[in-house]
Image (cartoon, coloured by chain):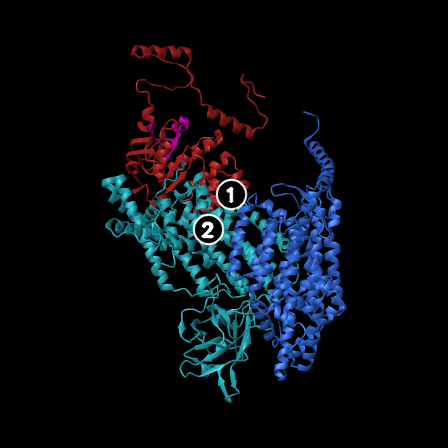
Amino acid sequence: MTFDPRPMDLLPALDYWLRTVGGIALIVLLTSLMSVGVSHRGAAIKLFGGESVGCLKDLISLSPRRVWAVAKLTFMEAYRRKALAVFVIFALLFMFAGWFMGGETGEITPDHVTVYVSFVLRTISWLTLPLVLVLSSFGIPEDIRLRSIHTVVTKPARRLEIVLGRVLGFSLVGTLVLGVMSVVGWLWIVRQIPSELLVCRVPVYGSLEFRDRSGNPAAAGVNTGDIWEFRSYIEGATKARAIWTFSNISERSLDSEGNLHLENEFLAFRSYKGDMKRSLLYDYQLINKKTGQSYTLPARPVNENRSAKDVVPRKLVDDAQKKEYDLIKDFVTDGKLTVEVSCIDREQYLGMARPDLFIRMPDLGFESGYFKAVLGIEILMVLVVLLAVTGSTFLKGPIAALLTAVILILGGKDCHEFMDQLVLGRTSATEGFRGGGFFESVYRIVTHMNPTTELPQNPAFTIMKYTDGFLTDFLWLDKQVIPRLEFFNMAEYVSKGFDVPFDSSLLPSLMILLGYFIPCVLLGYFALRIRELESK
Amino acid sequence: MNNLTSQQRKLAYLCGILVLLVPIIMLGLPSDGKSAGGTLAQLRSKYELGESDLGDVDPSSAAMNLVLLGMRGVAVNLLYNEFEKQKNTKQWFEMQATTESIVRLQPHFEKVWDMNGHNLAYNTSAEWDAVPDRYHWVKEGGKFLMRGVRRNRKSTHLQYFVANVYQKKIGTADESKFYRAYFLHDPEPKFKGGVDPDFNPDELDNYLVAKREYQKATTIEDTEHRPQHILDRSLFRSMPARCQFDYAMALHKDGKFGEEAREAWADALNDWTKKFGHETLTVPVGPLGTDVKFNIRLEMTRDDVRREVASPDDVARVAKAVEDYRKMVNYYYWTTRGLCESEKKTSEAHRNLYEANQFYSKQELEKAEEAALAGITGFDGILKQPEFSDLKSEDTLVEECLLAIKVWKHIHELADKPVPPDYPLKWLEAEHQGNLQYASNVQRAFKRLFLDER
Amino acid sequence: MSQSGATKESVIEIRNLSKVYRDFWGRPKVKALNALSLDVRRGEVFGLLGPNGSGKTTTLKLLLGLLFPTEGEIKILGKSAADVEKNEKIGYLPEESYLYRFLNAYETLDFYGRLFDMPASVRKERSEKLLDLVKLAPQARRRQLKEYSKGMTRRIGVAQALINDPDLVMLDEPTSGLDPLGNRDMKDLILDLKKQGKTVLMCSHLLADVQDVCDRIAILYGGELKVMGRVDELLKAQDETQILSSKLSPAAIEEVQAVLKKHGANVLKVDQPTANLEDLFLKTVQESRERPGHRTVKDGTAS
């Protein structure tokens, strides 16, 4: 497991969005007021007021028919200019190339499936997104350059309708291309890979707590020296535990035979080689938090780097005490089930992260996960269209394309991590770069001062710190403009055989798209409105 | 203009194109390793300028490089970043796929094959817990390097690394007992208990395969005139013979002491003295600062030197050089060891010591005592022979003997019998009494007698 | 020349309109228009004349909201130039018919019709009517605009300008690049629009065409208004009188000349009036259609 899906919190996200959009809108408003004031002096307020009223009127009198007219025009433009045909051919070629680039043609194992599926999804997005980016970036600038937009704006078509129509039109083009390629890709996968290897697991995750070797609560387990701190380890034959709590558990969580399916991907770490002939052992202990009752399931071997499936029957028999328990009635309280995992072997360690143990609900079809991932690409594509069309309202085609491409690159996970570090600055000792903000850094570089040395306490430096803080906040605001694109990449779920979770993947993507929709469309509208369309 | 119509002119051009295609194909047809190709391809192979002279040609590799339009460096950089990320997040198969892309882009960079092969065989295998899984990745590393050799037939280094995997990784890892067993009985179900034909097609012991691979490396060095820069040449040339020694030692570890083992030792001695000993090594013999070189053989005697060297001053220098190189490769030690171990009585002595440990583990104390005594008696006689006196300080042998003595004494303790005042190899025990290293190793080995594995 | 049905109500009011083109840094580059003030009244055909670069097209674009004025005020149909709602009642034919070349004639009119929020049935009906009006050949209507000749492009341009049955039609160089037949059709169309009570504003530098159709004209030069007024009044030669009669004998001519001399007038010219070349051309084309093979040569012999 390399992902840890966390459900999106809608309220804080909304608050975040309001703050960002509000901040940017305020800056734009003040800037435009100032510039109008400078150029028109006395008449500035009247002009500004007139424009605002005009904008409101435009917004109110939006016509779906006009928007659809522009959208249809856009679609036909792409279609008649044969933009689509070129890429369909490319897609087919690529698919054929993929057959040759596949490598050895041995038998397909579950691990090959990961590579194949992620290859297909990656190819699809790499073919669709650049096409859509280029088309969208050049749409409006070409219209302006060829002056065909004159015949549109001299009709009662609002600039807003033009922007919306273009966005809709390019989205339709992209959807068509994506649709065709995703079906082709799906057929390719289904032909290459035996159906029993194409799974779509539906996991139910819980929350994870740790106990250290003395049984006291701990923030995390032991670090055994891994660079990747995703997992931490519990020590065997001690009181160290990893405790999962699953919510909303009921009879519906069991399969038709009344069994609960647990699946894990624990890792093993040996502090000495020990008995190399067998794997390390772990066991599950079911705990009833209210009554204190517990039941320990038989020990099982670790199946490293592959999913280990453990079946917990509903009827649990304790031979030693000659008692029988019911999994749901005796161990599920208020819908919560607590499972404690411990490592059996002394001086050996068991590694886990929160998503490493989950309850496996009945599988969905592979198509379900695959097409949800395609939906993720679709949402990203619409975002690309949005950004490109907005950029094209105030930039020439190639520059708009470049701007959109750069935003997409900066939206990747690595860039965001880097930007987070820059923006956090010195506020957090463990994250962020040491050495302060802009002015402080300049000072430190010029004076060769060590980043860990404190600055002298005097008013000048206090002012410097405040200025830096202000600049960093401004940087923070700028950073928010760049979307977090990691949510759109759902290929990892599908390639590893999981269903795409709604609340931690599809919902954030939709929310991001929505969050960008309003500001981008408004920005595009204003940019076109204040622009003289006579191209010089 | 002429009187031909447009249609006729087009036809004429088409015919012209078709006619010209014939010499173009004859000249330019590429060679794909199997067919010789056109004139240019043949000239390329004659002067060793073509890619097919380096090894197998992979068309997708050329295609990928072409598509990148010269940005291969950038692409490889990005791929290595991906590779690191995948390695750190334990995505092994994705990492392997990225490795594939990297070698497609840089098929003739030795370091790329070396580093990635090492990563698969050593780093990745260590990250898995189950030994069959680890073995799988060792094999992947080995097969990967073999592919590297096929793409770069003139690379002595890559061939050496292939041999290394067979000799060192399989032979001396902590899991070597398992690996050597898996080498002949692969744990993957599809091989049904047999060998992996891509890894051990001839169903040999891993050391014998290693020996063969080292021989291939020395052949490449000779035929392609490609000296390697990993080891001193003398050490490099000694590897095949050393593998034969390893094989013989492994047979003893596995408890085989019969003719098979004795012959293995005899072959090792033969390889060492008759083959390696007679290899020509060009070594510097002049005073420091000069570049005077001479061809020596490790089996050269003083007379041989006198006969072959012109001036009397040089005789001393050359003789010294021969001595130095013999010391470097431990020539005397291995010769002595070979001579000793190829004798039947040595074999017997080893067997007795081995059986003593076995009986002791199973608590068959009488048999253990008998075997131990027989063993140390045997070695007492062998080590007292002047020609094998060097072996008195051979670590493995000494520890083996000391362990036998310890077992033998312990049996006496258990039976409440006094240890006789004089016993074979008592002098050896006394000689190494102060050696803490031997003491701790022997103690550990003694404890492990009760465990199933070494 | 033509009867003016113009009323006093102004459809376009321009007051002190100036336009200065600035460079990237805001420095003034060209003053394209300088304090222009004029009115266009309802129901008239108004011509905006001037040489190239005089500011005619700039004025038109300012009226349509494609450019923003540096100074001055514009009112069109009682609304400001920036108000999109005014476009409901306006039709515009651009100088070069900047249309979407990948659409065919039906699709073009359908698209523009949608922009007026017209329902499908209305759009269809109007498209057919307009394509017949502009005389676009039926076989050409389903071909993409990129395959059209210049004349056909102008026709479809006019059609899209009239799709919404506008009250005000603005034409930029309507007759430029057209052959005499097309030219005649365009002028007939303009007069027809006037008959329907529509107001037409046209920019042109082809003087003969303007003279034929316009009621009032304004002449611009260097961005400034130089002359404005009714065509017939402006062109009247104030100090001469022209009398047209049926053919006179030389004796009658002499007698007339004597009478004029008695009243103190100078006889400037006595001649047979000539028809204009356009009429000759049209007549020739018409006769060629009716009688193929007929030819009139200069010396008057028919064959």
Q: Secondary structure at mark 1?
A: loop
Q: Quadrant of residue B11?
A: top right
Asked if marks 1 and 2 fall on the same chain, the answer is no
Q: Quadrant of residue A397?
A: top left
Q: CA distance from mark 1 to mark 2?
A: 34 Å
Badge 1 density bin: few <14, some 14–19, many ≥20, Cα 10 Å: many
Image position, residue B146 (x, y; %): 66, 55
Q: Please name the residue shown 25% across and 48% down the image.
A: A460
Q: Is residue B291 left or right of residue C300?
A: right
- Please report contact status of discs 1 and 2: CB closer than 8 Å, yes or no: no
Residue bounds of the magenta highlight: C197-222
Q: Colour of chain A?
A: cyan
Q: In the image shown, does A320 or B239 lie closer to the viewer?
A: B239
Q: Position of residue A205 (x, y in %)?
A: 46, 70
Q: Is residue B365 left or right of residue A321?
A: right
What is the display colour for chain C? red
Colour for chain B in the figure: blue
| Residue pointed to by mark 1 | C102
The chain identifier of the residue carrying mark 2 reads: A
